[in-house]
Image: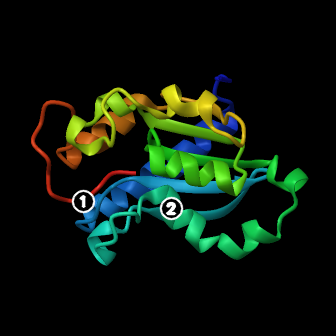
Amino acid sequence: MSRQQATEKDLACIDIVIAEANAAIDAGKAGVGAMLTWRGDVLAVCHNTYAETHDITAHGEMTVLRKLAEKLDAMSVEEKQDLCMYVTLEPCLMCMAAMSYAGIPRVVYAALSEDANIEQALLEGETARTINDGLVRGPIELVPGVRREQGIRLLERMHMRSGEPDSGVGHTG
């Protein structure tokens, strides 16, 4: 499993998804932000839309993938090598699988799975980091914990911090 250090560009991009997540929380929505870039250009910035749609699969990453479905489908395998997903919370198993199928080779995220309530997880002890090597379409380069403290603050604002009761805002991701 490949884990790299964050670049200056990664820090700037995580700041964008943190701002997206804070705006979502301010509006009474689930505050998990996600953004996809290609060759450094922003393709889409979204947040978890469960509060608006009641779609339990509407995690931030999934919302980005849906928004860009046609664009991603039209990209070559070579072009996809320059994609990067930025997320405020470590992706769940569903989102990791979807990103793998979409051909996204790199994911940078702030808060870790263990920073959130266990009730928000799908399988205890299974995280993006533990399943990554088993992805059939190849491991994704993971850059965990970038601006982790800010990611934890987002979880606290949503009352989804480990050891706190579920806020009822909806599923993470």
The percent coordinates of residue 59 (x first, y second) are: 42, 59
Mark 1: give few (<14), some (14-19) or many (20+) Cα within 10 Å.
many
- Up the image or down, 161 lies above or below 81; here it is above
Q: Identify the coloring.
A: rainbow
Q: Amino acid at mark 2?
A: Met
Image quarter of residue 30 = bottom left
Q: Secondary structure at mark 1?
A: loop
**Residue at horizontal 86 percent and vertical 54 percent from the top:** 77
Q: Secondary structure at mark 2?
A: helix
Q: Nearer the viewer, residue 90 or 11?
A: 90
Instruction: Tell me: 92 left or right of 83.
Output: left
**Residue at horizontal 57 percent and vertical 56 percent from the top:** 35
The percent coordinates of residue 37 (x first, y second) are: 69, 54
Mark 2: give few (<14), some (14-19) or many (20+) Cα within 10 Å.
many
**Residue at horizontal 66 percent and vertical 54 percent from the top:** 101
Residue position marked by numbered label 2 in the rendering: 62
Quarter occupied by the N terminus: top right
- Up the image or down, 122 lies above or below 77; here it is above
The percent coordinates of residue 99 (x first, y second) are: 61, 51
Q: Point out the residue furthest to the left here.
A: 165
Instruction: Tell me: 99 left or right of 17.
Output: right
Q: Nearer the viewer, residue 26 or 34?
A: 34
Residue position marked by numbered label 1 in the rendering: 170
Image quarter of residue 115 = top left
Q: Amino acid at mark 1?
A: Gly
Instruction: Tell me: 48 left or right of 128.
Output: left
Q: Nearer the viewer, residue 73 or 39?
A: 73
The percent coordinates of residue 7 (x first, y second) are: 68, 30
User: Residue 8 — which label?
Assistant: none
Q: CA distance from mark 1 to mark 2?
A: 14 Å
Q: Reading the chain from its start, which is encountered first: label 1 or label 2?
A: 2
Q: Contact (CB < 8 A) between labels 1 and 2?
A: no
